[in-house]
Amino acid sequence: GHRWATVTADDRSGILYIVTFLSFTYSSITFITRCFIKWRVFGADDAAALVAQIASLVQFSLLLLSLSAGLAKNFELLSKDEYARMASLQFGNQIALYIALGLSKAATILLIQRLFTNDMRKAWVVCNVVIGTVLVWTVLAALLVSSGCSPESLAPQQPSQTCPSIVVRYTLVVVSDAVTDIMLVVVPSYLCWQLQMSLTLKLQVAAVFAFRLPLIALAGLFLKTWERSLTVDNPGTHRTPAIIYQQAQLCVSLIAATIPCLKSFIKSFDTGSGVKAAFGSSYEYSSTDRAGSHARREGESYQLSSLTKSKDDTSRSTTRARLKAEDGEIRLDPRPFTSA
């Protein structure tokens, strides 16, 4: 009977269609969930996640168009125009994909930075260094997988038609990609270890950000299968596993950028000294002393900060804060926490 796609030795597009749609669906649902969680408390991390999702939509569209033009099929079955169109679309897909990957990393570190205020200089310096590194990687990765190569040389019909040094370039991109993912796992754990939090909560923070570790394996599998596809007799169909791993990597990266935003996780980010970080609709902060009182309300996330008070002020004033979340109130005591 009639089938939407038939998987044969010369046509693996059906498999790639399924993986592409599933990956984009999962990442999109996760992003929509993020929007509900962070409603009215959007920050720079959410802006980065939004741009990453837009880049993901672009690469998704280019990949579908490339599939319709002949991607994942035996190149010998394609006309010259189909092959040129497929190669050009796949060329653009790779650029958009690495931009989306890089911005998903930026969203993660921006979320970490958002949990700390400017007076915690050490945390902000570390986060700024990582943000700069990630942004530089994003630009370089997009350039390395495309600059100086024709679209046809990145989807060669014969090994001799392959763009010179492209294997070395992709290797550099994948290795540096793994390094940045390790940084995004180590940095949150390091910063949290400097705070007065229980060991259980520190391990919880480390576990949530460790969700990025499988990305290293996916990137490695992509590189291995992609290199192999350049030397086989039927590169069109043998490129399919590499693209599958790449789509899975992007999907997991986008999801990993949102997992730390889950309300149950953020609310448990307790420093052990009475201060919790949470994303709710608003928070109130007030302080009272002999001169009077002052209160303010802001529609943004509560940030972790290093609270200090001189000995003279301790006897004369008290500080209190109230954190409002959608599912209730949490009262905070004034005991300070500090960063090491």
Image (spheres, rainbow, N blue to C red):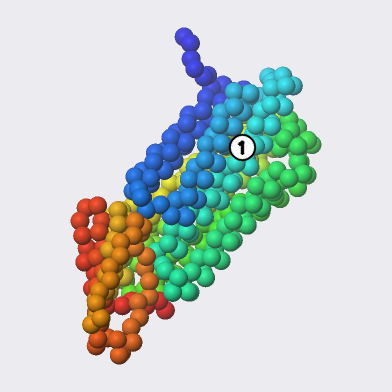
The residue that mark 1 highlights is: 93
Residue 72 pos. (x, y %): 61, 28
Q: Which residue is drawn at 27% across and 63% down?
A: 284
Would residue 153 be found to the left or right of residue 268 on screen? right
Query: Would you say residue 276 is visible in this rendering?
Result: no
Q: Could you tell whether 36 is left or right of 49 in the image?
A: left
The residue lying toward the viewer, choosing from 214 and 128, is: 128
Residue 232 position by quadrant:
top right
Residue 157 lies, in percent from the top left, at 73, 30
Q: Is mark 1 on a helix, strand or loop?
A: helix
Quadrant of res 291: bottom left
Most extreme residue toward the bottom, as rendered? Answer: 312
Q: Residue at x 79, y 36 (%)?
A: 160
Which residue shows up at 62% across the image and 40% down it? 94
Residue 240 vs residue 45, the one in the foreground: 45
In depth, the one of 104 and 280 nearer the eye is: 280
| Image vertical order of residue 158 relative to residue 323, above or below | above
Numbered label tally: 1
Q: Residues within 10 Å of mark 1 (few under 14, many from 20)?
A: many
Task: Let me know if residue 216 appears in the view.
Answer: yes
Figure check: 218 above or below 25: below
Quarter of the rendering occupied by the C terminus? bottom left
Q: In which quarter of the image is residue 117?
A: bottom left
Residue 101's place in the image compared with 82, above or below, is: below
| Percent x, y of residue 236 | 65, 29
**Residue type highlighted by circle 1:** Asn
| Above or below: residue 79 compared with residue 296 | above
Q: Where is residue 105 in the image (x, y as percent from the top left)?
A: 51, 53
The residue at 45%/70% (across/down) is: 118
Q: Residue furthest top?
A: 1
Q: Which of 183 and 236 is in front in this view?
A: 183
